[in-house]
Amino acid sequence: MTTATGSRTVRRVAHVMGFPVSLAVRGRHADDAAGRRAWEDAVDSLARAESVFSTYRADSWISRLDRGEVDVVDCPPEVAEVLALGDAAADASGGAFSVHRPRRDGGFGLDPSGVVKGWALERSAAALRALDETDFCLSGGGDLLCRTLDPAAEPWRIGIEDPFAPQRLLARVPVSTGAVATSGTAHRGAHVVDARTGAAPAAVAQVTVVGASLTWADIDATAAFALGPDAATWLSTRAGRTGLVVWADGTTTPVPDVQRSQW
Amino acid sequence: MSTPVPEARRRRRLVVTGMSTLTALVLLFGYHTSTDPTASAGTVAVGTAVAGSGSTSSGSTGSGSTSSGSTSSGSTGSGSASSGSAAGTTTVTGDAADTRWGPVQVRITTDGSTITAVDVVEFPTGNGRDQEINAYAVPELVQETLSAQSADIDMVSGATVTSTGYLQSLQSALDQAGL
């Protein structure tokens, strides 16, 4: 059997949805026509997500929905899927996470960005998952998912950025097949708010979540960040995830998987 | 500051009560199958052992794990049913099922009609690959300052990197180093 172990890692980069998308791929189709086609399909999938969900585009479905010009049933089916994910995330986080953000005028605006990114990356990876004997790690703007077919192969080595010095690494975590998502204030400033108060959480600088699904790792990282002082406590209740919370004072709290810690 | 990571041990014990928790046990072992079909051997072994044990028949419990097609010698096989101290309590230990990560063996306790406890008496360990079936590693703090060139990493996770900030980012350096 041909394994990906030891084979050369090929890298590809594109810019879509406002962030860079990086692919590291190794194995049989790393550098052939099928592999390149899968990469193009993944990027196309992300571009489609942007056209549907971008809150920066007045003509996106989500913007039209927000203005009341269309109903959910008029939109492509993934709109209902993403909004349902947002509701589930709101339930799981006690309301700290929401796709309905308080506006300055007192109303609520529709902003599913906290769900869309991880969900869209997860969906886009379907083309890469279809490649046989090929392992990959797909990253979009600092959130990523990995696939390794052979359990004996080396896991992907994931670095976690230092929120106080983004040119440095704060931690490392090996991931064979799974997802890593990080939420924080580096690069973009305070863009996550507690949906219950509309205020940016002060106690936490960065939250990283490792889990099976990038959709949920991304949601959990954002929700934990929004919970501020409760970030690590809440994250420790989430089964099947590990994580790392970096507090505003620079201290850190690694979060083991609640399932494992029960053993 | 750093929380110790639970090390895989040769024998782990999981005690659960009630039927609802059996679902959790099966999910625990079946967790990885959604992303890696090669893990199915382990899932079948455990899932079958639990399902078969519902009858409290030691025979069916022991033989249940053979459906994985990879049963080991089964040193504590079919005949290991024993009565406990409580009236009507029966304890049954299933055969150890070989998975690609190592042996898995489950012991159940019933009160005659309901499973009251499940012990995992044998669990794969040690070679690092057992993490594949039950959990992810906890991020490990890096003590030394690292640059992209010296870091032994494939990809970087960080707070949302925009395309404008990308050129300053570690990921950019990684991509360039690999192209």
Image (spheres, grey):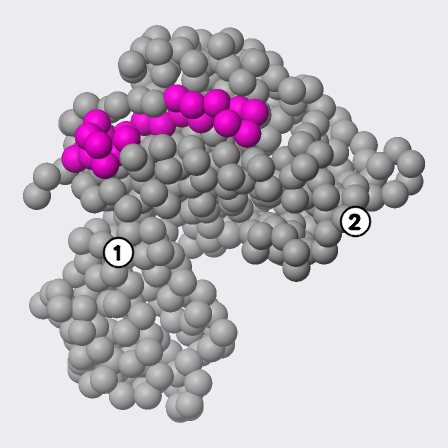
Above or below: residue B176 compared with residue A3:
above
* Three-letter code, disc 2: Gly
Point out which mark residue A68 bears: 2
What residue is rendered at 29% in x and 63% in y? B43
Circle on res. A50: none
Q: Nearer the viewer, residue A8 or B8?
A: A8
User: Position of A224 compared to B99: left or right?
Assistant: right
Chain ID at mark 1: B
Q: Is residue B44 something one can see in this rendering?
A: yes
Q: Is residue A224 left or right of residue B50?
A: right
Q: From the viewer's perspective, is residue B158 above or below residue A73?
A: above
Query: Which label sits in the foreground, 1 or 2?
Result: 2
Measure the C-alpha gap from mark 1 to mark 2. 44 Å
Q: Mark 2: which secondary structure?
A: loop
Q: Quadrant of residue A185?
A: top right
Q: Position of residue A148 (x, y in %)?
A: 27, 40
* Residue ID for mark 1: B37
Give the answer, above or below, for where B131 lies relative to A27: below
Q: Magenta segment, which residues?
A: A13-36
Residue A66 left/right relative to B113: right
Name which residue type carries label 1: Pro
* Magenta-drawn stretch contains A15: yes
Q: Is residue A38 magenta?
A: no
